[in-house]
Amino acid sequence: MIVSIEKAIELLMSKDVVAVPSETVFGLAASIDSPEAIKKIFEIKGRPPKNPLIVHFASLEQALQYVDIEQSFIPHLEAFWPGPLTLVAPLKVKVDPHITANLSTLAVRVPNHPVFLELIQAVGPLAAPSANRSGFPSATRSWHIEFDYGGTVPIVEGAEPEHGVESTILIQQKGFFTLGRPGATPIEPLKPYFKIVEAAVNPAEPQCPGQMFRHYAPKCQLITTFTAEVEAIVGFTDVDYPFSKPLYPLGSLHDPKQVAHQLFETLRLLDHDHIKLAYVDMNFPTHGLYQTIHERLSRAIQETFNLNRELYV
Ligand code: TXA
Ligand code: MG
């Protein structure tokens, strides 16, 4: 159900939630001043309460009213905001503890989408996780939201997300940052400005609580070895695969922006077409935006494996 910006403002001001396009993926937004709407986000998505939300602001100045960002990094933020970069920093005012899952830090970003910014200007800061049902691939087209919620969640009219993968998350430590999640902003251009320490990932103690939960996976099982049972190939339009199965295209191997834009749409099309087993081509570089694509696909593969195993235990 598509609604106008005016209607969306009305809903947000009356303790309701709306799906909003951002430049990365669709968000499911609520006013940070409405505990009822924040609660609704967790209920509708089926999101574990231990997984905190990102709060979206209209400007750097507005974000600085809520978090303590180390002074020397503030000027650099001007270069990346509005844009697909999220910072996690110490919270300096009180907000609904459901937003932060009771942590003393808050994830903040300024989105680069005119509709999202217009809503924030009218309503105030908006908490918004990705709009997908928890555990499923993020929503990058409006039909993904219709599919997940059967038309019950209002979607604000506006251009669909351009990047197709979520924001990059940096977590402020004392004098440096750790990488919480690779995302639409590659790490390389961030490095000269933010001292980024790529800490070894410990799955028992992830940087972002969200990494503990099931993520990005379609129902279709994804594997990286071709077998006779495989029904489809998730791969690149400019690679010749020696298997005669339908290609679910990710775009050109040489165009990571196109691949990111297509990634979740392609994973969702597998389920839409009732494909049960697909081969995924993971033979691509791991630098820049490819790092993010690699991370999302690796998690999706891992999760479909876990899911299908669960059926047998
Ligand atoms: O591009 C994006 O970031 C999209 C758009 C809508 O802004 N949002 C998004 O939200 O991807 P979500 O909820 O799907 O992912 C946010 C991640 C989760 O893994 C969560 O655990 C982490 O951010 N996070 C939120 N607050 C945090 C905090 N205080 N400390 C560490 N991680 C946090
Ligand atoms: Mg998400």
Image: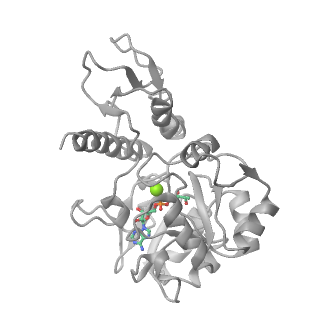
Q: Is residue 183 left or right of residue 204?
A: right
Q: Residue at x 41, y 39 (%)?
A: 218
Find residue 305 and report its horizontal and vertical position in percent: 26, 39
Q: Is residue 54 left or right of residue 200?
A: right
Residue 112 versus residue 13 in the image, above or below: above
Q: Residue at x 65, y 73 (%)?
A: 59
Residue 161 versus residue 199 in the image, above or below: above
User: Is any part of residue 244 visible from this angle?
Assistant: yes
Looking at the rendered structure, the number of numbered marks drawn on it comes to 0
Find residue 124 and report its horizontal and vertical position in percent: 69, 76
Residue 1 versus residue 193 in the image, above or below: above
User: Is any part of residue 157 visible from this angle?
Assistant: no
Q: Residue at x 53, y 72 (%)?
A: 39
Q: Residue at x 40, y 51 (%)?
A: 135
Find residue 125 and report its horizontal and vertical position in percent: 64, 74
Of all residues, the one furthest to the bottom in this rendering is: 93
Residue 76 or 251: which is nearer the viewer? 251
Find residue 97 and report its horizontal and vertical position in percent: 47, 82
- State the quadrant of the C terminus: top left
